[in-house]
Amino acid sequence: MSSHWWSGGLDRRATARAEYRRTPPALLEFDGLRCAVRDLGVGGLRIEPAPPGRVWSLGIAVVGEIQLRGSGRLPISGRIMRIDRAGLAVQPDGPWPSQDIVDIERDLLMRGSRERRASPRLPVPITFDVTTPLRDVSASGLRYQLGPYEQPPAVGDAIAGAVRLDADTVIEIRGRVVRRMGHEVAIALEPPGLHPDVLALLRLRLFPGGSQPP
C-alpha cells in the first residue's frame, strides 16, 4: 500500500486520478484560503505547496469547495493525513468528487495537453533589461503586445507560454484569449490564476515604477 499520501486508506495507484503536473492546478477554497490541487482521486488529493502563514498538523479539517474544469464548483470535505515538504495530502471525510467526476477531469486534462501542443505561444524573451511585451497583469488575467510578425490568436484560443524574468526565474502562463484590441491580446488565466507572491514579483520586476503601461 502506498505511503505517499497516508499510512492507511485507499491506494492512490489503484484508481485513475486527475494529475495537474504540466497545467494550472485545480482550485480548492476553504477557510478563506485558495489552494492549488496537483493530484485528485476518489481516495484523496494533494495540495502543493501548503498555504503559507499557518501551522499545519495532521487531522485538520479541510471543508470547502473545489473548482474543476469539467464539473465546476463542488463541495469537498476531508482531513489532512500527511504533511511533507511538497505540501499536504487530504483524505475524504464527507462530500467528495466521485470516480465519474475524476474521470471527466482526467479526460479534459489529457485533451488539453494535446491542444496545448498546437496552441499559440506567449512571447518568451522577456527580461527586466528589455522592454516587456506585457501591458497589464492581474491575478486573473493579463494583456500582452504582439510582435511585428506575430500572427494574432483568435478569441477563445488556448494560450500557453512563459514569462522569463531572468536566467533563473520563469513563470508559466496558461489561459484563453478573451479579447483582441489592435496589436494587444487579453487573456483570462486558468484557475487559480497567479498567486499573490507571483503577481507581486511580476509587478516589481516588469513595472518597477509602480505603474503599468497604458
Image: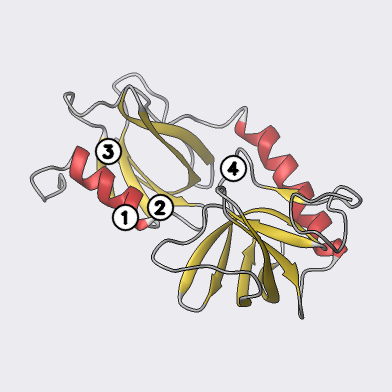
Q: Residues within 10 Å of mark 2 (few under 14, many from 20)?
A: many
For marks 2 and 1, give the CA distance. Answer: 8 Å
In the rendered view, does 113 fall on the left or right side of 211?
Answer: right
Residue 181 visible in the picture: no
Circles 2, 1 touching at the beta carbon (< 8 Å):
yes
Mark found first going from the N terminus, 2 or 4:
4
Measured along the vertical axis of the image, is residue 159 above or below residue 136?
A: above
Residue 37 visible in the picture: yes
Three-letter code for the amino acid on which mark 2 is drawn: Leu
Mark found first going from the N terminus, 2 or 1:
1
Q: Nearer the viewer, residue 131 or 22?
A: 22
Three-letter code for the amino acid on which mark 3 is drawn: Leu
Q: Residue at x 42, y 61 (%)?
A: 52
Residue under label 1: 138
Q: Residue at x 45, y 55 (%)?
A: 193
Q: Residues within 10 Å of mark 3 (few under 14, many from 20)?
A: many
For marks 1 and 4, give the CA distance. Answer: 19 Å
Residue under label 2: 194
Location of residue 72 by image quarter: bottom right
Residue under label 3: 134
Residue under label 4: 23
Mark found first going from the N terminus, 1 or 4:
4
Q: Nearer the viewer, mark 2 or mark 3?
A: 2
Q: Nearer the viewer, mark 2 or mark 1?
A: 2
Q: Nearer the viewer, mark 4 or mark 3?
A: 4
Q: Secondary structure at mark 2?
A: loop
Q: Secondary structure at mark 4?
A: loop
Label placed on residue 12: none
Q: Residue at x 76, y 73 (%)?
A: 96
Question: Percent position (x, y) of residue 172?
Answer: 45, 37
